Image (cartoon, rainbow, N blue to C red):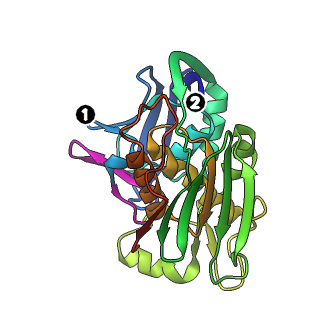
Amino acid sequence: MYCMKMQTIKDDIRLEGVGLHSGKTVKLTIRPSDHGKIVFLSGGSRIEAVFRNVVDTTLAVSLGAEGRVISTVEHLLSALHAKGIGSAEIEVNGPEIPIFDGSAKIYIDAINSVGKERLDIDQVFFTVKKPLEIRAHDKYVLFLPGDKFQIKYTISFDHPLLDRITEEYAVTEDLFDKEIGISRTFTFLNVISDLKEKGLIKGGSFDNALVLDGNGIVNGEERIKNECLKHKVLDLLGDIYLLGLPFRGKIIAYKSGHHLNWRAAKTLAEAGKERPLRKPLFAARTAVHYDR
């Protein structure tokens, strides 16, 4: 069992930016709270950041409840997960969390600026005692027991910069601040027209994503080595926070994306839902297969 005191932020964080897919300017305010949950507020609706409220995973994670939907929540959730924020309310006046520079850097800077505060609530971590693998064709997410948070991730695209690259590390707040959290989202030049025809990436630009052609990056250079892989880890941290609790253990992921990450969080949470959350949760099955 892992217990410590839950944390929130010390003061309000107010941000404004453009949504990646909607193209709309959105204001959001992240507020301290003491209810022990991450909750989005939109038009009077409350949307808890948990797997059961996921309504779409197409190119981003969308949460919905009480007739409202908030999209592209993963970068913010990743920062809250990595920086140990277990209780907060996020008020949003639009359909989507802004993309900012395509990373979680703005949240890192903001949380570091206002600081964190401990609550009189035990922070319980989601742990496993047996391996659980969630697989879709050749892609998979594997949860393993462990007393630290570790991730081993392999990215594999038909591209010279992204051809079967693997990194493994212990996830710490310092590593997130300096490497994972500053890594930007990426896309390929040859799919941009198709995405725009589908009404997506209306707010996309060379300022909020790495864009790759067949040879390399067309709009600058990587901030950090293997930035695209590290951004996939950033996404994974946000998606796995949909467990409703921070994770402790080891995750091995191969070519996973938002949909498989969400399936993994959902399957893991449901495998242990009958057990008290103050004790380690058991995986009910050793392997679960999906067709996506």
Instruction: Give left or right: position of 262 versus 177.
Output: left
Does 185 sit above or below residue 250?
A: below
Dot 2 or dot 1, earlier in sequence: 2
Q: CA distance from mark 2 to mark 1?
A: 36 Å
Judge whether residue 74 is colored magenta: no
Mark 2 — residue? 1
Query: What residue do we see at 70% from left, 38% from top?
Result: 173
Task: Estimate how packed mark 1 is, as few (under 14), some (14 to 19) or many (20 or more) residues with alpha carbons within 10 Å.
Answer: few
* Towards the viewer: 41 or 20: 41
Residue 102 lies in quadrant: bottom right
Rendered location of residue 78, percent (x, y): 56, 46
* Towards the viewer: 60 or 24: 60
**Three-letter amino acid code at disc 2?**
Met
**Three-letter amino acid code at disc 1?**
Gly
Q: Which quadrant would the C terminus be assigned to in this image?
A: bottom left
* Towards the viewer: 82 or 189: 82
Q: Is residue 242 visible?
A: yes
Which of discs 2 and 1 lies nearer the camera? The answer is 2
Rendered location of residue 130, percent (x, y): 55, 50
Task: Estimate how packed mark 2 is, as few (under 14), some (14 to 19) or many (20 or more) residues with alpha carbons within 10 Å.
Answer: few
Mark 1 — residue? 44
* Circle 1: element type: loop
Residue 216 lies in quadrant: bottom right
Rendered location of residue 56, percent (x, y): 34, 59
* Residue stretch rendered in magenta on the structure: 55-72
Judge whether residue 59 is colored magenta: yes
* Circle 2: element type: loop
Q: How many marks?
A: 2
Does 221 sit above or below residue 4?
A: below
Rendered location of residue 27, percent (x, y): 43, 40
